[in-house]
Amino acid sequence: MRNKPFIISILAALLLISLHVQAQKPDKKGRISDYSDFESAMPPVRYHGNPIIRHGGWAGGQVQEPCILENPKDRSKLVMFYAGANLVAKDGGKGAIAKAWAYKSDPYVWFEYPGNPILTSTGQGRNDGTHVSQSAIIIHKGTYYMYYSYRGTEVLPGIRYATSVDGKTWIKQGTGDILSRGSEGSPDSHYFEWKQVFKAFGKFILMWESFNGKEWTACMASSDSPGGPWTKSPVNPIFRPSGTDGTFDKLFAATPAFYLINNKWYFYYVGACEGGNYNYNTWDMGAAELLGR
């Protein structure tokens, strides 16, 4: 979501697993059968029991950035890796990575592991300023594709990518950004970071969180190839803060991620209800469901 000391590079390792849970496709009776249906069904409908994971304990200020996989040892369960941190005002925002699990039959109810928490910008062929972070990875035809954010003299200018044949040695690809911040007034004109990538409906879909100077939202783009070109969706932003008093996500909706579970599209995100600098807000995690129209 921002330049935290605990940016989830663990995603690189997590997404090396072939994601059966993402590879599933709706059957013919499913209400969302192609990308057009998927896009027109936006926005997802919030779960009435939100938030599903609350800040507290070692993550005294924030929980965020969920990455959800099928448990390779028990296909009836899901495993979530997520980040958490204390507030910047308390100890500089020190954070770590944690785990939780849920039954696939009820992906709204998560059980946090009692042992939580559980666990650089030049080189690889190109200089990407002073910082690279927020990696999202997909495997296609034996090649690993990593999409990442970077920082330099301009803060968060866009997303770039690198490839690998073994998941260990990476080469930066392209001549620059594959997706950049939008023009003034667009949903992602000021901020463009955390992301998820997956394949569905014959397309590669990239999610990210965005800020236009007024509200934090979720956006997406699609491509026929993992190397691009990428096209931003005309329905962006696909998810916004609730704007409702008393809700945990009144002002912020960030770290968006879709997962296909039991032929339904579930949307996980984090939200905050306090204004001002997000570094000093408390964040909780929520979920929503995509309904066909």
Image (tube, rainbow, N blue to C red):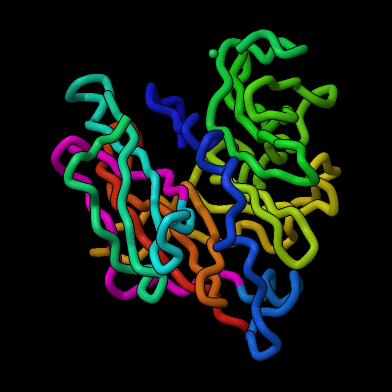
Observer-nearest residue: 257 or 238?
257
Residue 127: % across, % down: 71, 10
Question: Is 205 above or below relative to 210?
Answer: below
Observer-nearest residue: 50 or 266?
266
- Residue 53 is a magenta residue: yes
Name the chief secondary structure element in magenta: loop
Residue occupying the far bottom of the picture: 29
Observer-nearest residue: 238 or 259?
259
Judge from the rendering whether residue 223 lies leftward or rightward of residue 146; answer left or right: right
Q: How many marks?
A: 0
* Quadrant housing residue 95: top left
Judge from the rendering whether residue 125 lies leftward or rightward of residue 114; answer left or right: right
- Residue 32 is a magenta residue: no
Q: Residue at x 25, y 43 (%)?
A: 282
Residue 293 in sight in this render = no
Residue 19: % across, % down: 58, 55
* Quadrant housing residue 33: bottom right
Where's the C terminus, which quadrant?
A: bottom right
* Quadrant housing residue 59: top left
Residue 134: % across, % down: 53, 32
Residue occupying the far front of the picture: 73
Q: Residue at x 61, y 29 (%)?
A: 149
Q: Residue at x 76, y 37 (%)?
A: 143
Residue 236 in sight in this render = yes
Judge from the rendering whether residue 91 lies leftward or rightward of residue 188; answer left or right: left
Question: Is 202 above or below relative to 81?
Answer: below
The stretch in magenta equals 42-67
Residue 144: % across, % down: 71, 36
Question: Is 48 above or below relative to 96?
Answer: below
Q: Residue at x 54, y 45 (%)?
A: 209
Question: Is 241 above or below relative to 5?
Answer: below
